[in-house]
Amino acid sequence: MPTVSVGRDRLFAALGKSYTKEEFEDLCFCFGIELDDVTTEKAIIRKEKHLDEEGDENDEEVIYKIEVPANRYDLLCLEGIAQALRVFNKQQEIPKYTLSDVSKDSMLQMHVKPETSSIRPYVVCAVLRDISFDEASYNSFIDLQDKLHQNICRRRTLVAIGTHDLDTLQGPFTYEALPPSHINFVPLKQTRDFTADELMEFYKSDLKLKKYLHIIENSPLYPVLYDQNRTVLSLPPIINGAHSAITLKTKNVFIECTATDLTKAKIVLNTMRKYQVEPVEVVYADGRSYVYPDLSAYNMEVSLSYINHTIGVSLEAEEVTSLLNRMQLHAERSASGNNQWNINVLVPPTRSDVLHPCDVMEDVAIAYGYNNIPKRKPASVKPLALNEFSDLMRLEIAMNGFTEVLTWILCSSKEISTMLNRQTDESTAVVGNPRTSDFEVVRTTLMPGILKTIGHNKDHPKPIKIYEVGDVVLLDEKKDVGASCRRRLAALYCGANSGFELIHCLVDRIMEVIGTPFVPVGDDTGYYIQRSDEPEFLPGRQASITHKGKHVGTFGIVHPEVLNNFDISDPCSFMEIDIENFL
């Protein structure tokens, strides 16, 4: 959840009212946001620098850190929060968003070259006119860009925002893609020219910008924006040019958002809107042209009965429309026949989070007050069969003297490959965007977590008997998300001897409990075991488990090399079964 830092006094001035800390916490709760912390700017700096000395907080500006929903991009700045709270408190009407009346002939243009399609194919633009920055509003404007970059822009991979002093530039503009050696300009906060490839090397030591270099550095062409005089506006998504840097004296701002996702770019541009917005025409090489930003609202019709039934209240149509108006959604009632009412909602361009009737329903619930919704027990909640079966498995394994453990579902790629003697890599597992080497992929087996538990408890009295019932994730092209989740049971014995016979007995006990008889190999009416050849187990001391003709698991003595990889000195036996196959 994003946290927005705002000056308390500036916020209260924008709200037209002062609050105590408790009163403002209540207001935030009613609106669906949270006052996360109260601090000062100097206290934040002292904390970042790990300084112990305390300053005189009476002489420092009080900072409110407000936590907002991740999809409410309109609340990522002081101005957005203040406007939303004013409307919520009925101090202000719902704002209407319109474009300046500019003829097509006098409209600024951005011409897109076809080469950009290979790197960042989209660009959207707008102009903000007649701005009067002070230091606080300037910092808020820059901070909003940073918040959007980290949030919806996905660290500039989907969208990169560039803001420029329009009075230092000359339109029309062009968006191009050129070899890095052909791009030369003075970047922001620098005093000399760099070629784009020189900039890549220069910013590798920059703590802020180096994390964005990977987005384009391996591309043969880099995206770049020019004005009519071939002045570089920016090298997205890395850095703007120094020539068009905005300052406190800037009166007119040109905004350009280059993107790999056009929908996200439109949302970002709409969120950046302030003051008087002037449209810009974007012209592509094939003759297509579009005018941005698109500030048109769209209609959504939601059944009143759906809202009441889902929330668990009985509200009249007038009450619902009043509540939605407080949430910046212009609403009116309309008849739907059979004495039923629908609610027509006009969704403004700033509310990109409203995609479905359930989003409208949620806003009604927030404005009505969660604490005012009557508490009720569901008539019947039947647990999933898989969860019921998992609980029965846990009970049975525990009665056999095993202790349950819970381990991380994320692990490093080597823990599911080389550390298990497997010749696989992370391409066989679901990979996210890892922040640490310990949590790179989603586990494909429960074995690493169980072995790490033993490795961290080497001094525990032996024998150690532990088990886990948990999920693994496997790549699956048949699924729309490309992966499937499977519930598995794993158990391990660690002691002075391998305990292979105990693990074997546990397998037999599980099959006995679920009512599956032991049958000869090839008989599909029960289960049988066969010799297996898995690299994580000792050769000749392992077996695969087949249940009604389908392979469901493996057990055996863990290979000494695997034990050594997890810093385990005692022999271990391990078994893992996919229990979903028993349902």
Image (cartoon, rainbow, N blue to C red):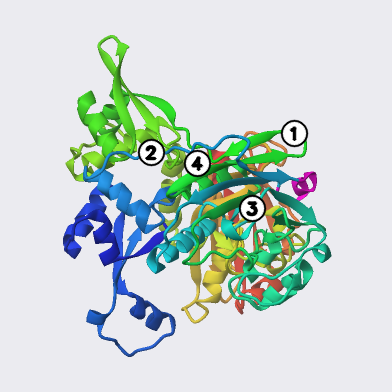
Camera-near label (3 vs 4) is 3
Camera-near label (3 vs 2) is 3
Three-letter code, disc 3: Val
Marks 3 and 4 close (CB-CB < 8 Å): no
Q: Who comes first in sequence, dot 1 or dot 4?
A: 1
Separation of marks 3 and 2 at Cα, in angstroms: 28 Å
Residue hosting label 4: 514
Separation of marks 3 and 1 at Cα, in angstroms: 41 Å
Residue 458 vs residue 327: left or right?
right
Three-letter code, disc 4: Ile
Residue interval drawn in magenta? 113-120
Q: Residue at x 18, y 60 (%)?
A: 18
Q: Is residue 45 above or below residue 228?
A: below
Quadrant placement of the N terminus = bottom left
Separation of marks 1 and 2 at Cα, in angstroms: 57 Å
Three-letter code, disc 1: Gly
Residue hosting label 3: 430
As helix, strand or loop, the secondary structure at mark 2 comes to: loop
Camera-near label (1 vs 2) is 1
Three-letter code, disc 2: Pro
Residue hosting label 1: 287
Q: Is residue 29 above or below residue 408?
A: above
Residue 495 vs residue 75: left or right?
right
